[in-house]
Amino acid sequence: MALAELGSKFHWLWRRDLYENGETECHFGFYGGAPTARLPSDAPRFLYFIFQSKAGFFGDTENLLSVMQIPRSFCRLFSTFSKSQRAISNSTSLNSIKELHAQLVRAQMHIDPSSISEVIKHYALSPQSLPKAHFVFNQIQRPTLLVWNHMIHGLSKSDRPNDAIHFYNTMYYKGIQGSHLTFIFLFKSCARVSDVRQGQMVRVHSMKLGFESYLFVSNALIHMYVCFGELAMAQKVFDGMLERDVVSWNSIICGYYQFNRFKKVLDLFREMQAINVRADSVTMMKAISATCFLSEWEMGDYLVKYIDEHGVVVDLYLGNTLIDMYGRRGMIDFAGRVFYQMKEKNIVSWNAMIMGYAKVGNLVAAKKLFNEMPSRDVISWTSMIIGYSLAKQHAEAVKLFQEMMVSMVKPDEITVATALSACAHLGSLDAGEAVHDYIRKHDIKSDVFVGNSLIDMYCKCGVVEKALQVFNDMKTRDSVSWTSIISGLAVNGFAESALNVFDQMLKEGICPTHGTFVGVLLACAHVGLVDKGVEHFKSMENTYRLAPEMKHYGCVVDLLCRSGYLDMAYNFIKKMPIVPDVVIWRILLSACKLHGNLVLAEIVSKKLLVLDPSNNGNYVLSSSTYAGSDRWDDVIKIRKLMEVTNLQKPCAYSSIEVRI
């Protein structure tokens, strides 16, 4: 039989199955040497696949061209295709992919699934060219499973994971069964869109085809259930696996970590070690983070030892976790050692070091790192501002925030709240108002935290009207908001307003706190509402189940003393269920001096000198009490007692804010 006849008989096979059956072109190799071979009408496509798969039968390309009497122009075309296919496997350049696509179109091979699959694969994996992949896919009459998988893979990684699920459903209804790769991509897509129903359906399909026993499929399934929040199902899949690798362990560990099951994370790590599964950087990162949340520092040290002994690679993320752990423990030298050994650092690394230095009060080192940072974000600035505030360097905190306001970094609500707190401590109204203006102009989210900070700042600066305005403008208030405005009004002398706000608070169903009652008792003391104050004090325990603290007892003593009920105050102190501190006795002694009650003053004075003999203020207060009643002999005795105990009266001072 002539090769040309044989070729024409087999040609229909090519068109039927688009070269999926590789045996057809084998016959041309078998009958090699026939000089009368002629090409079918779709010769470019036909020959290209012969060249790709069966040129070996002829020894080399030149023999094949000679045997089949193929023009040299097609030889050049084949050479171009071969080079393009090799290039595309080594390059993901979109231009090279487009070039190959254009060549396939010119050769009328763009609707062939076997030839176009690589183009679709690379188009699908690029967000910019994903629509192009869809267009090319739609031109193929009978896409192969490989082509379907390329599309599903690309969509699963894109911002359109729902389309990956839709593609699979279409493929399924066309009677095409997926491979293990199909289900890996689908489980990830279902996880991303939290489609539980579709995820369960896909799992049923994978089980019917026997793919759930595949290691990578089970790993993807665990990840999907974790994303659904179904830890029990994830654990069930994990327990049923015949084979596990470190990815399997990491998947279930990450799941428990994600839902704050930190003890379980460490238990799983111990199980890994019991069966000699070697942990990697992901395992160690989650385990060390778990020790941080649980403050299990002994376990943390063991994990560090494990990293050293087993040569676990300390990558960027594990390095940042180690810095965070050491920073939390105040072991800043160890954190620095990790930081400077890291080959790659990001802004998280720098921020973790700055926060660590700030926590231990080493603001010089923190500021040095801050200045050396290649770039800064809001966390960098906030960490430094908080560090200065914690160190009581409020002026530096305000100054740094002012620098931040002119930088390109926009502060968040934590930053502005910290800056406002610093302004409040300084009593700097100008700086506080500047921060408030910045919040309004730059549309910074004014949450409850920021609102409370503004109320506190304005109250401490004595501008109660603006504090009330902020309070009234707040859409959402918590107990801190009410407590701040009540205390601010009381301290600034607006006692009646404070009590009115407290009544409003109770009407709105807000439960008062310990801090709220401090403000209420102060307000009652300022206006002399003794009965009302005592009533509120008793309601703490009787109504709100709040055990009074030392500051509340002090407020009641102050309330009674201001109204002249010194004996009642003394009896109240003696009946306290907790031992009164020196502050409470000083309040009573000051009242004795004011009201000239020397009998009680002597009793209280002796108590103070026994409780706190090294405090010169107690001696000065006792001396001035005697001097107010012209008992100079007793004044001299107190002064001599001060000399014996080597105490001196401190120099008085005051501070003011200077506006330049």
Image (cartoon, rainbow, N blue to C red):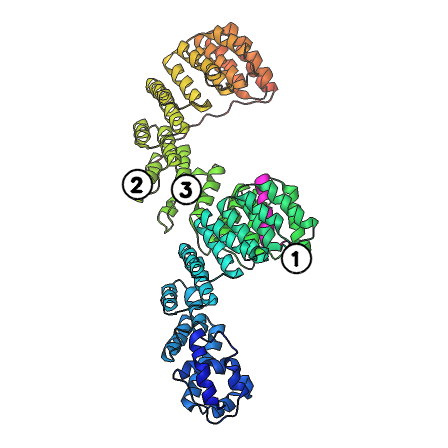
**257 or 174, which is in the foreground?**
174
Q: In x, y percent, where is residue 637?
A: 57, 12
Q: From the viewer's perspective, is residue 117 above or below residue 315?
A: below
Residue 466 picture quarter: top left
**9 or 57, which is in the foreground?**
9
The residue singled out by tag 3 in the image is 415
Q: Is residue 657 visible?
A: no
**128 or 422, which is in the foreground?**
128
Residue 207 picture quarter: bottom right
**508 or 254, which is in the foreground?**
254
Q: In x, y percent, where is residue 604?
A: 54, 11
The residue singled out by tag 1 in the image is 311
- First-in-chain label (1 vs 2): 1
Q: Magenta: predominant secondary structure element? A: helix
Q: In x, y percent, where is residue 1?
A: 50, 90
Separation of marks 1 and 2 at Cα, in angstroms: 52 Å
Residue ranking furthest to the bottom: 35
Of helix, strand and loop, which one carries label 1? loop
**Which quadrant does the C terminus fall into?**
top left
Range covered by the magenta-colored residues: 277-294
* Residue found 36% across the figure and 69% down from its top: 139
The residue singled out by tag 2 in the image is 440
Question: Mark 3 is on which residue type?
Answer: Thr
Label 3 Cα neighbours within 10 Å, binned few <14 / some 14-19 / many ≥20: many
Question: Mark 1 is on which residue type?
Answer: Gly
Of helix, strand and loop, which one carries label 3? helix
